[in-house]
């Protein structure tokens, strides 16, 4: 067991790319949202945010300064686009091999399990209907106003688990997961089952980099 792992009371997992394979068409999603922005008279080249959920929030704030009803309409329609694309991906989505066995193993070892995602709850439950049976807390973007890497998302998990950030480790397939964990004092693990490279995880400052999530066992038994 890694020395720092001995004091961990919980493991928080990202979902897409970490526990499950969902081929979400982010390019299609972004194209549709930017098309919607054009309809509402918002110039996408003037925005400061990088990721789509945050872009939608930024556009919402801009529109609120002009017309609150238009802002609400844009927000609702943008999230309908996200939901549609995510549900399409979920229909062909699947848990990665060994995930259920790993989660059971970790809970048997006395660790609390959290699952968080920027995805919608319905998409996750389509891929993993028994999610509540395999974790102590599951929080999708539908349950928080600010999603990871904003601290509110992980803080909501630690609050419900009754632990501090220093007592938990965040596991994910994207630098956002590493960033999110670090912001609340967590140790972080990057897994190479998504699109992020080892070098990108090293640059992000991940404490460990594993081939896939099942190798978390190495930290307990190695």
Image (spheres, rainbow, N blue to C red):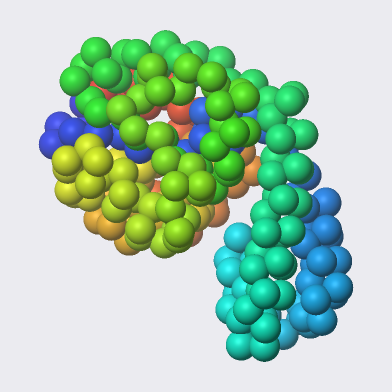
Q: Quadrant of residue 33?
A: bottom right
* Residue at far left of view: 7
Residue at (24% x, 13% y) in the render = 108
For this rendering, which residue is in front, 221 or 123?
123
Give the answer, above or below, for where 12 lies relative to 149: above
Residue at (72% x, 85% y) in the render = 46
Residue 17 is situated, as x and y percent measured from the top left of the image, at 58, 35
For this rendering, which residue is in front, 215 or 22?
22
Residue at (67% x, 74% y) in the render = 69
Residue 90 is situated, as x and y percent measured from the top left of the image, at 69, 30
Asked whether, in this view, residue 179 is left or right of residue 64, the answer is left
For the C terminus, the quadrant is: top left
Residue 197 is situated, as x and y percent measured from the top left of the image, at 59, 46
Q: Can residue 14 be seen in this view?
A: yes
Q: Is residue 192 visible?
A: no
Residue at (67% x, 54% y) in the render = 79
Q: Quadrant of residue 24?
A: top right
For this rendering, which residue is in front, 68 or 130?
68
């Amino acid at each position: 067991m890694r020395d720092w792992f001995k004091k961990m009371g919980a493991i928080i997992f990202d979902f897409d790319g970490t526990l499950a394979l969902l081929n979400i068409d982010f390019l299609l999603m972004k194209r549709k949202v930017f098309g919607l922005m054009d309809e509402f008279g918002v110039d996408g080249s003037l925005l400061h945010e990088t990721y789509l959920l945050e872009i939608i929030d930024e556009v919402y704030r801009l529109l609120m300064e002009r017309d609150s009803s238009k802002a609400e309409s844009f927000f609702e329609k943008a999230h309908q686009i996200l939901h549609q694309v995510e549900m399409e991906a979920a229909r062909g989505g699947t848990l990665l091999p060994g995930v259920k066995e790993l989660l059971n193993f970790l809970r048997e070892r006395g660790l609390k399990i959290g699952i968080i995602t920027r995805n919608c709850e319905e998409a996750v439950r389509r891929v993993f209907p028994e999610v509540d049976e395999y974790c102590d807390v599951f929080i999708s973007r539908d349950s928080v106003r600010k999603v990871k890497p904003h601290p509110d998302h992980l803080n909501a998990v630690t609050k419900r688990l009754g632990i501090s950030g220093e007592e938990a480790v965040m596991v994910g397939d994207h630098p956002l997961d590493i960033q999110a964990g670090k912001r609340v004092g967590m140790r972080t693990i990057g897994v190479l089952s998504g699109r992020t490279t080892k070098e990108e995880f090293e640059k992000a400052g991940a404490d460990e980099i594993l081939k896939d999530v099942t190798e978390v066992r190495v930290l307990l038994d190695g």
